[in-house]
Image: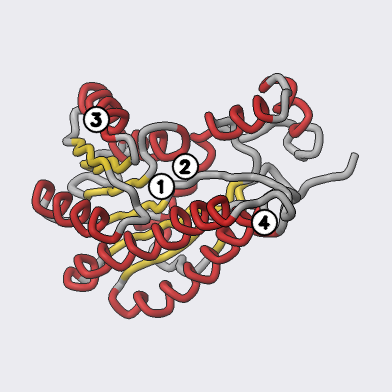
Amino acid sequence: MDRRFEGRVALVTGAAQGIGLTTAERFAEEGANVVLCDLSADAARSAAASIEKKFGVHALAVGCDVSNEAQVDDLVARAAERTGTVDILVNNAGVTRDNLLFKMTLADWDTVMGVHLRGTFLCTRAVQKIMVERRFGKIVNLSSTSALGNRGQANYSTAKAGLQAFTRTAAIELGPYNINVNAVAPGFIDTEMTRATAARRGIDPEEYKAQRAKNIPLGRVGVPADIANVIAFLCSEEASFVSGQIIYVKGGPETLR
């Protein structure tokens, strides 16, 4: 595989599993040193050790609650101190607290908004200082097809839609400093989070995947690598004129068959 990111440093939030981990691995495979941020410091350290052993790059693990301003500032400071800079930021950290409106608590709402919106804002604000000074940077935010609306996800859908507006605005403000800002909006991806959703609904995960695949033109659900591949493209020089875009990665328009 080409080493498009040789000499670059990529910071990925929510990087201990799922899309975040696969994305960090993709950057490492292509030569980047990586900073893995996760709420669980132990899980981040385990993932970092695996990446270093497998790809021979430097991987720094940092436990961080992305909704906490002080922790985010410390995360970015440690990343810059240990690696010299931050060239790429992937705002992937996310949680769900699904419920219908009449059952949704304020805590359900605030938790999801805090991680997705506040977290993305804090991480972007902290990292852009480094990128602006160096006049180079790539930022990718993780939205979702749920941004278009989804029953039982008023909080998550609102947060993911907000991230799209944030992406476009950040692209406008940071573009003059040679910083590209884009968003990827995955459809159904087979991750620990979606398997937990199936379990919560009392459905076998494989059966749940099969049900969801019926409405996807390509006939299958996505896997984390499908998203990591697009993120890697958006952070490469091949996408140097792409900014402020929302890329839906969902196997085609949903059908009603």
Between disc 2 and disc 3, the foreground one is 3
- Percent across and percent down for residue 51 are 27, 28
Q: Upstream in the sequence, badge 1 or badge 4?
A: 4
Q: Upstream in the sequence, badge 2 or badge 3?
A: 3
Distance (Cα) linking label 2 and label 4? 29 Å
Q: Residues within 10 Å of mark 1 (few under 14, many from 20)?
A: many
Residue receiving disc 4: 154
- Percent across and percent down for residue 74 are 18, 54
| Badge 3 amino acid | Arg
Q: Upstream in the sequence, badge 2 or badge 4?
A: 4
Distance (Cα) linking label 2 and label 1? 5 Å
- Percent across and percent down for residue 163 are 52, 63
| Badge 1 amino acid | Ala
Q: Quadrant of the C terminus?
A: top right
Q: Quadrant of residue 241?
A: bottom left
Residue receiving disc 3: 45
**Who's the residue at 19% across and 33% down the image?**
57
Q: Are marks 2 and 4 in contact (CB under 8 Å)?
A: no
On residue 229, the disc is: 2
* Kind of element beneath mark 4: helix
Residue 114 in the figure: left or right of residue 160 = left
Is residue 210 shown above or below 174? above
* Kind of element beneath mark 3: helix
* Kind of element beneath mark 2: helix
Q: Is 168 in front, or is 240?
A: 168
Q: Upstream in the sequence, badge 3 or badge 1?
A: 3
Q: Residues within 10 Å of mark 3 (few under 14, many from 20)?
A: many
On residue 232, the disc is: 1
Between disc 1 and disc 4, the foreground one is 4
On residue 184, the disc is: none
Q: Quadrant of the N terminus?
A: top left
Distance (Cα) linking label 1 and label 4? 30 Å
